[in-house]
Amino acid sequence: MTTLETYPITVGNVTRHVPLVETLPGMRIPLIEFLGDTELVEEAARLLKERVPEEAEMLFSLECSPVPLVHRLAQLTELPYVVARKRRRAYMEDPLIQEVPSLTLGASDTLWLDRRWAERIMNRKVALVMDVVSSGGTMKALDRLVQRAGGKVVGRLAVFQQGKREFDGEVDYLYEIPIL
């Protein structure tokens, strides 16, 4: 039986030893998942709350791992939130589609935003929320979706910054983690 190699992360008063996973040959990253970890979500949302721009009228993120984080942050800030999907759903009407190059995971992705959700973003000031920002490709795609929906990005928030970003926009993050 092999021992799983881990990496320690700390968010406020919460420490976890997360698995190191190889995403590309010779590239390992700490795998941070907020799904199912209410203590980690609560602490991260509490810390991010102070960084949400005052002018923000809405939060925007994507499925899957950041959902509990953006949900709890929405509760703490009393702001509504919208989530982009990673695949088309049968019920979507005239969705906005945005390609996402992912350098860290070695595969591209596509984000889908139902027209009905896009209309909620129109003319709103939006803060983007992510769990981890690496290359910045996903953050850039979220930014582009907000613009295409007629909203204005007023903040970009993340719990972790991992490696070197290729994204030009400013990201307000809590902690740095390495690509090993």
Image (cartoon, rainbow, N blue to C red):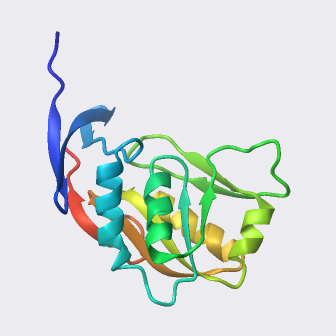
Q: Is residue 91 visible?
A: yes
Q: Which residue is at a point 28% across and 33% down the rendered structure image?
A: 21
Q: Is 176 displayed left or right of 74 in the figure?
A: left
Placement of the N terminus among the 4 image quadrants: top left
* Vertical side of 61 occupied by 39: above or below: above
Q: Which residue is at a point 46% across and 49% down the rendered structure image?
A: 102
Q: Which residue is at a point 34% across and 45% down the rendered structure image?
A: 37
* Residue 35 pos. (x, y %): 42, 43
Q: Is 165 displayed left or right of 86 in the figure?
A: left
Placement of the C terminus among the 4 image quadrants: top left
Q: Work out which residue is located at the far top of the displayed protein and give it.
A: 1
Residue nearest the observer in this picture, 133 or 68 = 68
Q: Is 9 displayed left or right of 145 in the figure?
A: left
Q: Is residue 136 visible?
A: no
* Residue 92 pos. (x, y %): 81, 51
* Vertical side of 23 occupied by 60: above or below: below
Q: Is 21 displayed left or right of 117 in the figure?
A: left
What is the quadrant of residue 146 in the picture?
bottom right
What is the quadrant of residue 177 in the picture?
bottom left
Residue nearest the observer in this picture, 66 or 74 = 74
* Residue 136 pos. (x, y %): 42, 62
Q: Which residue is at a point 67% across and 43% down the rendered structure image?
A: 87
Residue nearest the observer in this picture, 77 or 92 = 77
* Residue 33 pos. (x, y %): 36, 44
> What is the total number of numbered labels drawn onto the structure image?
0
